[in-house]
Amino acid sequence: MPTFLLPVTRRSLSFATTLLHFSSSSSFSSPPVQFLISCKSRDLAHALRSQFPKVVASHEHESVPDYSDPKDLQEALGVCDGVILAASGCGDDVINLPSNPKDEWLQCEQNVASLVTKDHFVAKLSWTEGFVGERSPSAVGRANWELERELKEKCGGGDGWAHNLFILRTPTGMDAFLRGRLFDLVCGRTLSMSVKRGRIALVHPLDVAETFSALLNQREKVGEFGEKGVVTLTGPEALTFQDVAEVLTAGIGDKVNYSHFPLWAVKPARWVRGVPGDAIEEELAVIRALEAGAQEQWTRTCWRICWDVSRARFASMSLRMQARGHVPTCFSVGERCLCSR
């Protein structure tokens, strides 16, 4: 059974927990893979191991490799067949303010990427299609592009890298709704956004984790779902924010009005709140890219990979459930929530 190193940051804990859940409850008679946890908390690693004993490997001498320590990482990678780079989780999206380039998740993935070899199989949860590139308007998109490029070089380059590397690109705008970023706006019955005509194919975070788990368990089939190891995952429909307002209206049984917040008003509004100038300019660039259709693509990858279609949610269905209070705002599995919040 191959072992994959799984670095878990505060930001990725929810995603990691859900990934472990799907891996331990897969339809296979025995789990196809197991995971070695790398984190900064021994208690957290032991909690994950006790909750998912089928898929979480024991640590020799009860030590837990720290992803910020190169020596720990080197030793851990020496006993692993591959590594999961999902330290960012899927909690960031283009309608949130940009992440700090010095974020813990980025430093974690840079540390791991610098030490992997072509003998490792690498599975990376990247950012959304349309925003990963050298000239991306988003710092997160540029950072992920740099990581992807380094991994491709480490894993052989050319066409060969696809055999021991897969990258999942997915828009995670759904998280902004599930985690309550728009809670106050919805309670005020007004959805105020600066994107007027641009569409986003929202995808549920649980679908991201299930798809990632399915690809990991059937690595030889990655080529069927993407090009050269890059798989694009979206929701089944691209929604405007006017559409989202209508979905929320249906969900709560009360009118939610869409309000266009003009682009010229974004800068003074953010400046008053103390947002740095470079972050404001980045947000404006992202809004313009969304308006130009950077995230309007949609695919049926989730349905092709996850055969249990009852698990694959339409974005509209999820938003209705959230509006009614039926969707949890964390990734609790079982009786106890492992979220740090």
Image: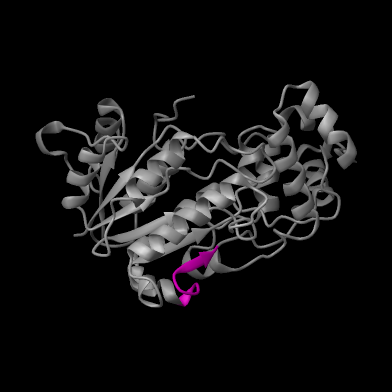
In which quarter of the view is residue 321 placed? top right
Number of marks in the rendered image: 0
Residue located farthest toward the left when viewing the structure as drawn: 61
In which quarter of the view is residue 128 placed? bottom right
Residue at 55 percent across and 58 percent down: it is 312
Q: Coloring scheme of the render?
A: one colour
Viewer-side residue, 58 vs 263: 263
- The location of residue 97, given as percent across then percent down, is 67, 36
Q: Which residues are magenta?
A: 224-232
- The location of residue 255, given as percent across then percent down, is 87, 38
Residue at 39 percent across and 46 percent down: it is 110
Q: Is residue 125 visible?
A: no
Q: Is residue 266 left or right of residue 74?
A: right
In which quarter of the view is residue 253 placed? top right
Q: Is residue 259 left or right of residue 26?
A: right
Q: Is residue 258 left or right of residue 146?
A: right
Q: Is residue 198 visible?
A: yes
The answer to whether residue 207 is above or below residue 236 is above
Viewer-side residue, 140 vs 341: 140
- The location of residue 56, given as percent across then percent down, is 24, 44
- The location of residue 268, given as percent across then percent down, is 84, 28
Q: In the rendered view of the protein, which quadrant contains the N terminus?
A: bottom left
Residue at 49 percent across and 60 percent down: it is 168
Does residue 282 belong to the magenta stretch? no
The answer to whether residue 185 is above or below residue 75 is above
Q: Is residue 137 left or right of residue 58?
A: right
